[in-house]
Amino acid sequence: ECRTMIAPTAQRRHIRLLFPQDLDASVVADLPPVATKHLAQIKGACPEARDAYGHAFREGMMRSLADVLVAVTGYSGYVPATEPKVTVNARGCSFSTRTIAMTFGQALDVVSKDGEGYAPNLLGSHMQAQLLALPGGAPSTLYPPQPGHYELTDSIKVFMLADVFVVKFATHDVTSLDGRYEIKGIPVGKARLNALLPATNASVEKEIEIKAGETLEVPLELRFDAKAYAK
């Protein structure tokens, strides 16, 4: 059994509220990821795709864990999205993340960042035509029709995959390869902190209370069972 820790940079096993209404932390994995079948599907010169999809989950420096969806819910009030779009880069036959969090009403832009063209497809939505993200061109813009769980893939490079979560609130973020995330604008009061690693379905929920002028530390862990995952 592997433990995946959500922790600040300097002190493991805790999530730290840096200042009122902002949540910041990092996620660290304790054991190596398990190889997946996607590795065999990647053909040609796609080293970044092998790094992105060749294991059950991605790790960065110091065993930090990427692609964890972190959200705060259950508070009083409404926190709107601050940006109209979420941008995902496509480079080296891979997306820049394997987990995407969006607030309903936001658009999803896919941008080619190399010399390749990409044909992004949002599975679960009803696309009227195949859109292309060409090198140096405009982004391919996708519009999730309603809140829910979608999958971003590529119609040509079918091994390119990212889970897309469209929710009705804006207090969410996804960890990058450094394992860190930041959630701003959390109202003061009681709330719930949730973390999910879609690649393994490991999740955890914790009751928290946001207090003005105080720093809150919350111990959390996600468990990963390599034997169960391999079945």
Image: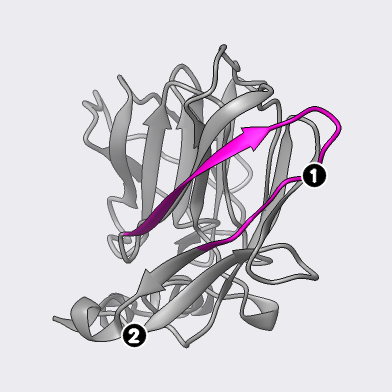
Label 2: which secondary element: loop
Q: Is residue 136 above or below residue 53?
A: above
Residue depicted at x 57% and y 28% = 190
Residue depicted at x 48% and y 87% = 31
Q: Residue furthest right?
A: 213
Q: Is residue 23 visible?
A: yes
Most foreground residue, 227 or 140: 227
Q: Is residue 40 above or below residue 102?
A: below
Q: Are marks 1 and 2 in contact (CB under 8 Å)?
A: no
Can you tell which mark lies on residue 29? none
State left or right for residue 33 relative to residue 211.
Answer: left
State left or right for residue 143 relative to residue 231.
Answer: right
Q: Residue furthest left?
A: 231
Q: Is residue 138 visible?
A: no
Disc 1 residue crowd, few under 14, some 14–19, many 20+, Cα 10 Å? some
> Which amino acid, mark 1?
Thr
Q: Kindly identify which residue carries mark 1.
A: 215
The picture places residue 6, in percent across and down from the top left corner, at 58, 63
Q: Which residues are magenta?
A: 202-220
The picture places residue 106, in percent across and down from the top left corner, at 50, 22
The picture places residue 154, in percent across and down from the top left corner, at 33, 52
Label 1: which secondary element: loop
Most foreground residue, 111 or 149: 149
State left or right for residue 33 relative to residue 200.
Answer: right
Most foreground residue, 216 or 105: 216
Quadrant of the frame with the C terminus: bottom left
Can you tell which mark lies on residue 35? 2
The picture places residue 102, in percent across and down from the top left corner, at 48, 32
Rendered image quadrant of residue 20: top right
Is most of the magenta stretch helix, strand or loop?
Answer: strand
